[in-house]
Amino acid sequence: MADVVVTPKPLSEQQVVDVARHGASVELAPEAVAAMERSNELVQRLARSDRPVYGISTGFGALATTHIPVDRRADLQRSLIRSHAASNGDLVEREVVRGLMLLRLRTLATGHTGVRPVVAHTLAALLNAGIEPAVREFGSLGCSGDLAPLAHVALTLMGEGECAAAMRDAGVEPVVLAEKEGLALINGTEGMLATLVLALHDLRRLVTTADLAAAMSVEALLGTDRVFADELQRLRPQPGQALSAANMRAALAGSAIVASHRGPDDTRVQDAYSLRCAPQVAGACRDTINHAARVASYELASAIDNPVVLEDGRVESNGNFHGAPVGYVLDFLAIAAADLASIAERRTDRILDKNRSHGLPPFLAHEPGVDSGHMIAQYTQAGLVSEMKRLAVPASVDSIPSSAMQEDHVSMGWSAARKLRRSVDALTRVLAVEVLTAARAIDLRAPLQPAAATGAVVAALRERVAGPGPDRYLAPEIEATVVAVRDGVLLAAAESVTGPLS
């Protein structure tokens, strides 16, 4: 039995992650095969007629008015794929390629594209054999979907391109594309959607990690937890804010460090915004993630092609391939991620500044002057945040006409997706530097003890990174923390005390 059975119904986010990231196998359900057989019968009838139907008996894009003779219509599909497999630049990540393959497979399985079942079975065989076509960074404008990235997948199905030998070695037979099948393989938004789904999966973990990192910084800076009280959060009923504040309260519960300065001797009226407003910023990021997830759910339920085969037998052109809905939220997520990283960097900087850290040594150095401590870790963090701000400039407000002005307004959604990939990675690294720095500061607050949850995070980190001391080679320690954040190790340590965090 396959790990994921593909039917005409929507795939879940977790199914996409399982196949894309973890190599789960796939299988076509019988109802999907039946749906494809029904629609393909109609396409075959149209292919034998003289009636002009876009993509079956005509050219593509600006060549849509060019009539194609019956005996050349199969050649039309092969030429389409060869010419459109024109991406360039660095290779796209394996998980994105597998994700777009799976999502296109599900679109074929709806029966709205008119392909033969053999095309879908071969695409499933590529996934199961672990063969990922060589898709490159540039080539999609997000107009008629992700044409170039998907064309490289279709080229592999034909037994051509860089993966031809791997396909032969795996015993996967190439497909000779019939009428409409080339177009049906490439006219979708699956590349940008795959990126969105993977980013949502990662960002949910990262925003909770950001709550945890902020709580550690509150302890490191002798901040107060009073501002996170539920009755204060209810005065502004933003749902994400309430969840982030609840996470911070749980993480700080029982903290002796926080309790140590609750008395009348503490003359500070309130903490800096980067501490006090942590739930407001992380909460807004959470709400953005939830909005993007709603858009993703609509896209996961979509059957995007042009033309499409309708249930009543009509074949109709449409504009559903335009990537605007996905492009907008990809850009929106990059904006939210950049701001979440920005506030994390501000907390780190406060911890390292002896004038604002309330008694910590400069840069947390073992011997200030001889040692630099985490000075340059913050430089690295600041460089990442600056890069994220550039990545937050929206791609979806741009449009560059193509195909002789037939495609005169494009979404640039693929570009938004590529930016978000880099932004999610950078956010992971920014949070790792905050956690690494806050943990060192918490150690330096001894004999005061942190909360049980934040203490568990420090203990889990100490299994990978040593505690305070003279300067060491810092880059491996940062990278070890990045891996612990990315893999959810530190979040799991906190949840071993608090139970599941939101």
Image: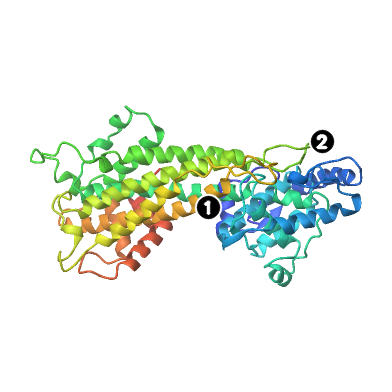
In this rendering, position of residue 293 left or right of residue 159: left
Asked whether residue 464 appears in the rendered view, the answer is: no
Residue nearer the viewer, 361 or 229:
361
Asked whether residue 386 appears in the rendered view, the answer is: yes
- How many labels, in total? 2
Residue nearer the viewer, 134 or 483:
134
Mark 1–mark 2 CB contact (< 8 Å): no
Q: Residue at x 75, y 49 (%)?
A: 183
Residue type pointed to by label 2: Arg
The image quadrant that residue 42 belongs to is: top right
Residue type pointed to by label 1: Arg
Q: Which residue is mark 2?
A: 314
Q: CA distance from mark 1 to mark 2?
A: 36 Å
Q: Secondary structure at mark 2?
A: loop
The x and y percentages for residue 208 are 39, 47
In this rendering, position of residue 494 left or right of residue 91: left
Q: Residues within 10 Å of mark 2 (few under 14, many from 20)?
A: few
Q: Residues within 10 Å of mark 1 (few under 14, many from 20)?
A: many
Q: Residue at x 64, y 49 (%)?
A: 146
Q: Residue at x 88, y 43 (%)?
A: 46
- Farthest left residue in view: 265
Q: Which residue is mark 1?
A: 418
Q: Secondary structure at mark 1?
A: helix
Residue nearer the viewer, 220 or 27:
220
Q: Quadrant of the C terminus?
A: top left
- Farthest front residue in view: 404
